[in-house]
Amino acid sequence: MKKKILSVIGLLAAGALTLSMAACSGGDDSASGSDGGATESSKIVLGADDGTEEHWTILKDKLAEEGIELEVRTISDGVQLNQGVQDGELDVNLFQHLIFLSQFNVNNGGTLVPVGATAVYPLAIYSEKYSAVEDLPEGATVAVPNNPTNLARALLNLQRAGLVELKDGGNSLSTPEDIVSSKVEVLPVDANQTVTALKDGSAQAAIVNNTQAQKGGLGDDLIIFKEDLDDPELAPYINAFVVREDQKDDPRWAKLLEAYHSPEVEASVTELNQGNLQFKGDWSAEDLQAELADLEEQLRATQ
């Protein structure tokens, strides 16, 4: 696997990691032995940021057939989702890609690892006024998410779309200061405001993540540029099930992955995301963990 991309998360704002670390309530202690080693349990407590979606119900039913009870807890904050696994209040979580995970581990002394891939989601350019990137006029404003995880990725997308040129070709540590020439004005905003900037006219185009596009009612017909999800350089953005390192060999994860990648669950996830994703079930836990280690090494080198 190519591992060319550098981690963006060295730019992480310090304030992002000062969010409340309040632990989730009441995990299932049977998931871990007294010595911290992996033991098989008939219950999995999973943390997610979208625990009410239909695919979780389907997944619960699939696992029940294997004799495993799945409890899904919805937690909106990513740091709390990871801290819950780190502290043993959660067995596993699913909400993040490898870059975000490496950010948590390096900046919080975490020992979390991926044990199975789910999918990679696009970061697309949307416009309600123009139907093609080439139609954007000189000086048009393009809103981009300002969180470090997606900012550099957004700038690289603008470069691929021919709208900006980045210093030395850019990398996943790039910031707006690295723009050496540009056809457009780049407007960093909170990720939650990318759709708003598009709709209120303060931007003629916007780079919007899949979740915000769904919430904002942006259809595929408004996409004027989309990443190639087959690009191996998007490996750091693969989403994964994540557990504590001393639990990585628990046999439940293989059953969880098999159930998640069943036709029924994948169909539900595909419908939820309007087809804007690519499943990555062919990635092994070992490949994911090697990718994570590489990202963490690169991040530490920037500190």
Image (cartoon, rainbow, N blue to C red):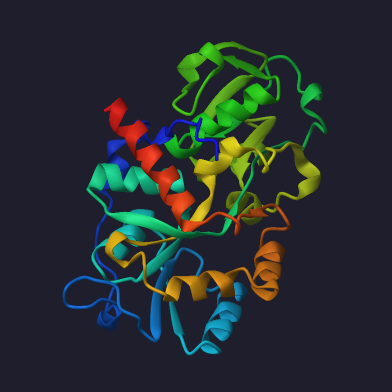
Residue 287, position in %: x, y?
A: 48, 50
Residue 19, position in %: x, y?
A: 28, 51
> Which quadrant, please, contains the C terminus?
top left
Q: Quadrant of residue 267?
A: bottom right
Q: Image height check: is 206 above or below 262?
A: above
Q: Quadrant of residue 223?
A: top right
Residue closest to the eye, 200 or 240: 240
> Which quadrant, please, contains the N terminus?
top right
167 left or right of 218 in image: left
Q: Residue furthest top?
A: 180
Q: Residue furthest left?
A: 35
Instruction: Tell me which residue sits at (63%, 17%) in the image.
Output: 164
Q: Image height check: is 89 above or below 122?
A: below
Instruction: Tell me which residue sits at (67%, 25%) in the image.
Output: 160
62 left or right of 68 in image: right
Residue 99, position in %: x, y?
A: 43, 43
Residue closest to the eye, 249 or 259: 249
Residue closest to the eye, 290 or 184: 290
245 left or right of 66 in image: left
264 left or right of 255 in image: right
Residue closest to the eye, 209 or 6: 6
Residue 224, position in %: x, y?
A: 76, 35
Q: Is residue 108 visible?
A: yes
Q: Quadrant of residue 173?
A: top left
Instruction: Tell me which residue sits at (67%, 53%) in the image.
Output: 278
Q: Is residue 97 visible?
A: no
Q: Image height check: is 184 above or below 108?
A: above
**How many circles with numbers are drawn on the protein?**
0
